[in-house]
Image (spheres, coloured by chain):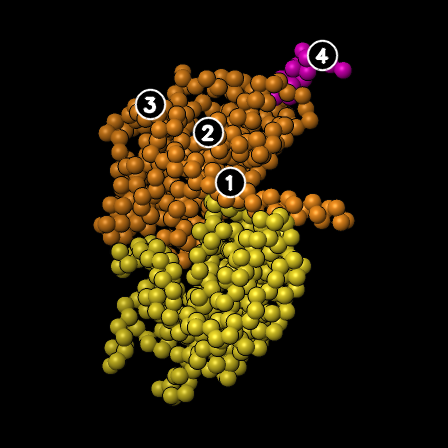
Amino acid sequence: MADQISNISTTQLFNYTLNLADNSLIMGHRLSEWTGHGPILEQDIAMSNIALDLVGQSRNFYQYAAQIKNKITPSGDGGKGTPSVDRGTTEDSLAYLRDADEFKNIILVELPNGDWGYTIAKLFFFSTWQFLLYQKLIPSSDAQLSAIAEKSLKEVTYHVRWSSEWMIRLGDGTDESHQRIQKAIDEIWNYTAELFLPSAFENACYENNIGVAVSEIKNDWTQKINDVLKEATLTSPAAVSSPLLAGKEGRHTSFLQEILDDMQYLQRTYPGCKW
Amino acid sequence: MQDETGLLETFDDKVAKEIKIEPRDWMPENYRKNLIRQISQHAHSEIVGMLPEGNWITRAPSLRRKATLIAKVQDEAGHGLYLYSAAETMGITREEMVDQLLTGKAKYSSIFNYPTLTWADIGAIGWLVDGAAIMNQVPLCRTSYGPYARAMIRVCKEESFHQRQGFEILLTLCRGSNEQKDMAQDALNRWWWPSLMMFGPNDDNSPHTAQSMKWKIKRFTNDELRQKFVDICTEQAKILGLTIPDPELKWNDEKKHYDFGEINWDEFWKVVNGDGPCNSERLAARVKAHEDGKWVREAASAYAEKRNRNN
């Protein structure tokens, strides 16, 4: 029987992995709403491509989270207090059968797309953060997280480049695009504070050399954001004082519920079916 | 310098010898016009075709299905892109073609004016709509105009992958619960006839066919291809355990083909002429994307100009 300490860290590892998965899935889901509606064909393709990368990342993380979960609560062991699990946990049960308050994504990724500039700003902030996070996750003592981070980093490197180029193009394009992208930055800025607020599971994983201390990537993130904004002739908003954002703890905006209503609709309407 | 008769002879000779016509070659004006019409309609169909399926990306029932569907719709955007480029080699710009689409001057495949009501529709589109498209497009890989033929080779490879995916979606449903099987049957009921219409009017009613066959743009007539499609799909429907909604569908041992019922041509022409269930919705979605994207395209051009000035 597993001892108490490793049990606690397994639950934390599960939550940590879910957080990574949920961030990628919800962001990918949002970006996929652009498919077929982009401003020009080449960029429609690029945006869909990034959505696809993110959904792919989320699948890797969910599959790992399912493995962890099935170890914590093996299906069919009938032990007392063990939640009844029919087919065991899978990537799809995690994505399609959890309620909004069980999702651990940051609020930033659930925000609606707004116009092209708003989506680009969200993606630029998010990808830059994901890039730094994955870079620091590669040396993780957890071989699986390390491998997924390494694989995903290649994709995210492109997402950062692509979104940075768009930030610059919009910022230094026309008066209208400059105003639109600046407005997007100002509106989204407050939500970026949550990127660096560690949750209990992040702290626990960091202490066990599994996870990343998100507060430690804040300086590099700020530097990169400021460099790009400067080149884009845009202004960085003032720092956020005390953000009230707890997506990682499952406290979301109603936007997440709207996403899940759509996303989970078939799985919820026809329970237990294979698709 | 050859005169027009000489040029025409050279052109006809190349077509006869299966030598591809290339953008710089002389070609009859009607050949050019006909191809621009066909290639741009084809490109528009890919782009408008993104909408009915894109509609299910956010509701795809598993992560694997979601990823596959995003990739599929993205492939269609890619096909649109190669086809617009192929048409541009004939002296029309993408802007002109997009403008023709958005102002309703250009046609696109009518099939996309039908709604996608359930998840099974995504399977039915893959199996039937992509299946019909492949039937039309495989011969186009040998079409006489080089850039079009080459674009089609790439398109066909991806389309056959999509067709298998669609069939597999339906197969999963047909092996599932009764509700899932009903969903699959309902999708087949709604998509079967519109899919047969994708091959166009009957041969005696198809104004472009004879000339297109002569120029080796087309290799088979509409009715030949439609027959081939019916023969193949009827067998595939048996594997699925679904019933094709045509009481007249019957094997004809003499012809070695399936006989099938008459298409509702009244419906066909109504949808072609703009009165299908989703014509205005599809066009409105394209117009909206174009208008919403205007400031983005302007910003990109303005930025590119600034960069060029500074270099």
Question: What number is the disc on residue B3?
Answer: 4
Q: CA distance from mark 1 to mark 2?
A: 14 Å
Query: What segment carries the magenta color?
Result: B1-15
Residue B9 included in the magenta stretch of the image: yes
Q: CA distance from mark 3 to mark 1?
A: 33 Å
**Where does the image place residue B2, in percent across and percent down from the top left?**
73, 14
The residue identified by callout 3 is B265
Question: What number is the disc on residue B290?
Answer: 1
Q: CA distance from mark 3 to mark 4?
A: 44 Å
Residue B103 included in the magenta stretch of the image: no
Q: Earlier in the sequence, mark 4 or mark 1?
A: 4
Q: Residues within 10 Å of mark 3 (few under 14, many from 20)?
A: few
The residue identified by callout 2 is B104
Dot 4 amino acid type: Asp
* Display colour for chain A: yellow
The secondary element bearing badge 1 is classed as helix
Name the main secondary structure of what is drawn in magenta: helix
Q: CA distance from mark 2 to mark 3?
A: 21 Å
Q: Nearer the viewer, residue A4 or B160?
A: A4
